[in-house]
Image (cartoon, grey):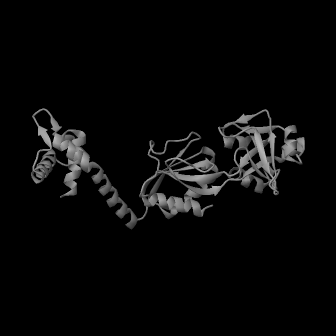
Amino acid sequence: MDIDVLHTFIDVFRHGSFASAARERNVDPSSVSRQIAVLEDELGYRLFERTTRRLSATEAGRVYHDRIAGFIDELTLAREAGADVLGAPKGQLRVTASVAFGERWLIPRIATFQTIYPEVELDLILSDAVVDIAAEGIDLGIRLGTRMSGSLVATRLLQTRYRVVAAPDYIAQHGQPVSPVNLGDHNCLVFRLPGYRSHWRFRSGAGDITEVEVRGTLSISNALALRRATLDGFGIALLADWTVDADIEAGALIDLFPAFVTSAADFDTAAWIVYPSRAYVPHKTRAFIDHLKAST
């Protein structure tokens, strides 16, 4: 049985019209009508009732459609998967991440990927809201936090470490805290997002955990703005390593407690690559995942 004829049947059933199906397939309506007639002859029963005013599926046509629709989808995916493996990655790849992670970590790694795979068109959706990957047609997302759960496939991209940092100007004016417990005497900038608290946790090399309640005159819901305020000497902040490590290396910020593991939530946090659960992951998606992992 001709697979193209089955695709035509699915399109006619979906549109309820030979003309509409023909427009979608960019063929003449008479060609669509002939294909349906050939299929009906082969099956031995009518799939559609035809009148001068409307086209409607017969009961047999509805049953036939319900049984083959999933099968046709699988055949299409199988054909695309085979072609995908043989060719270079190409097409649009939709990726979502937080604004800060996109700006500080992801975008600097995109140029190399596009040099290697020039036929892949990246569409970056940067948002601090949790994007519904399946509903929005996203191929891949990067989520920050503890181990991911749910219907998405998750693979660890990189471990996230947090730094307690301040600008040299702030330290010059207010002094440097010698211990985490001294943070109560300083203006601490709070990251105002769900899961982050005004209690910062410190784990020493010996495994001892100290929790310190911090207060300050400024709370911010965006990590980039929090970094900017810290650079400008507003106060002391707790920020992810991928946000501030370059600033520490350049001397623009000081890592106040490098001997401690720090966090405002869970100590075991990471950046996770997540994508829809399915048997086949397109070549372009796999290539991007491999590139990101090689860039850590």
Q: Residue at x 17, y 40 (%)?
A: 59
The residue closer to the viewer here, 230 or 182, is: 182
Q: Position of residue 119 (x, y in %)?
A: 44, 59
Q: Position of residue 271 (x, y in %)?
A: 61, 52
The quadrant of the rendering that contains the N terminus is: bottom left
Question: Looking at the image, is 7 positioned above or below residue 232?
Answer: below
Residue 120 vertical position relative to residue 55 in the rendered view, above or below: below
Res 265 → quadrant: top right
12 to 250, vertically: above or below? above
**Residue at 37 percent of width and 61 percent of height:** 81
Q: Picture quarter containing residue 60?
A: top left
The answer to whether residue 103 is left or right of residue 227 is left
Say whether residue 141 is left or right of residue 77. Answer: right
Q: Is residue 210 visible?
A: yes
In the rendered image, residue 291, in percent from the top left (x then y), is placed at: 55, 62
Asked whether the viewer can see residue 112, the reply is: no
Percent coordinates x, y for residue 52 in the rendering: 10, 34
Question: Residue at the spot x=57%, y=49% of the render?
Answer: 148
Q: How many marks?
A: 0
Q: Quadrant of the C terminus?
A: bottom right
